[in-house]
Image (cartoon, helix red, strand yellow):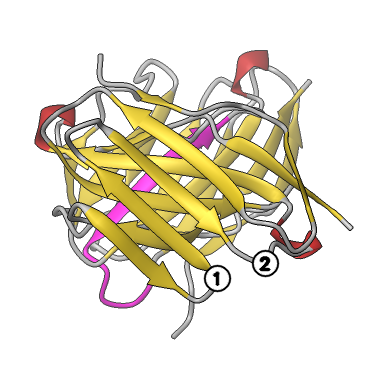
Amino acid sequence: QKEVEQNSGPLSVPEGAIASLNCTYSDRGSQSFFWYRQYSGKSPELIMSIYSNGDKEDGRFTAQLNKASQYVSLLIRDSQPSDSATYLCAVFGMDSNYQLIWGAGTKLIIKP
Amino acid sequence: EAGVAQSPRYKIIEKRQSVAFWCNPISGHATLYWYQQILGQGPKLLIQFQNNGVVDDSQLPKDRFSAERLKGVDSTLKIQPAKLEDSAVYLCASSRTGGRNNEQFFGPGTRLTVL
């Protein structure tokens, strides 16, 4: 059974600080990695995708991928209260029958 | 570009009743997904369509759930009869393709409560 693991949190971060969210996965053949943000009562919203080792930056968000260690992380710089949400990690690989395997999410709380 | 549309947004039914959900994907997206999300969990794939064909329905409880995408555009998901444990949010998502660059975009979801 292919798995994606995330700390459920809540992760509490002061406003203006860097929030660091982590995700580990079991399938070494995984190819594509996604971070979704889900506000309470809303549907998941894609915020970052990453396909190769290293960092990918988009505004205040940076995704980091390390395939050798099988983890992917999301950094949020200058955290704002509006970043308070659950962040879902999703991983795509051939061994998962071409499906996204989802983590259960990390709840992030940004304290003013 | 219009997003994924779903209806209804909320539904409350008694157990053993039937219910249907509708989804219209983003224009031009060939792949459509139905997910079930229970509070505190990640989405669980129920069924994946590529155009009007089923790619994966291995986690669809086929004794009570059915889905169709007859013309390769919009889709319906039906539950008959509903059980208490079907209370969840039903999410529809679409992607341009089903390949590795598999960016999925979600509709607003339907919150189902079974009493």
Above or below A31: residue A17: below
- The 10 Å Cα crowd at callout 1, few under 14, some 14 to 19, many 20 or more, is few
Which residue was labeled with disc 1? A60
Tell me the residue at 70%/59% (across/down).
A83
Q: Secondary structure at mark 1?
A: loop
Q: Secondary structure at mark 2?
A: loop
Q: Position of residue A45 (x, y in %)?
A: 53, 59
Query: Is B27 inside the magenta-drawn segment?
Result: yes
Q: As shown in the figure, which amino acid type bears the numbered disc 1?
A: Arg
Tell me the residue at 14%/54% (across/down).
B99
Q: Position of residue A66 (x, y in %)?
A: 25, 42
Task: Tell me which corner region of the image, top left, top right, bottom left or bottom right, holds residue A23.
Answer: top left
Q: Position of residue A92 (x, y in %)?
A: 23, 42
Range of magenta residues: B26-37
Labels in figure, total: 2
Q: Nearer the viewer, residue B85 or A66?
A: A66
Q: Are marks 2 and 1 in contact (CB under 8 Å)?
A: yes
- Left or right: where does residue A61 sit relative to residue A51? right
Does the rendering let one see residue A44? Answer: no
Chain under disc 2: A
- The 10 Å Cα crowd at callout 2, few under 14, some 14 to 19, many 20 or more, is some
- Left or right: where does residue B110 sit relative to residue A69? right
Query: Is B23 inside the magenta-drawn segment?
Result: no
Q: Quadrant of the N terminus of chain B?
A: bottom left
Which residue was labeled with disc 2? A78
Tell me the residue at 68%/15% (across/down).
B84
In this rendering, do the residues under marks 2 and 1 share a single chain? yes
Whole-number angstrom distance, CA of label 2 to CA of label 1: 7 Å
Chain under disc 1: A
Instruction: Specify which label sits upstream in the sequence, 2 or 1.
Output: 1
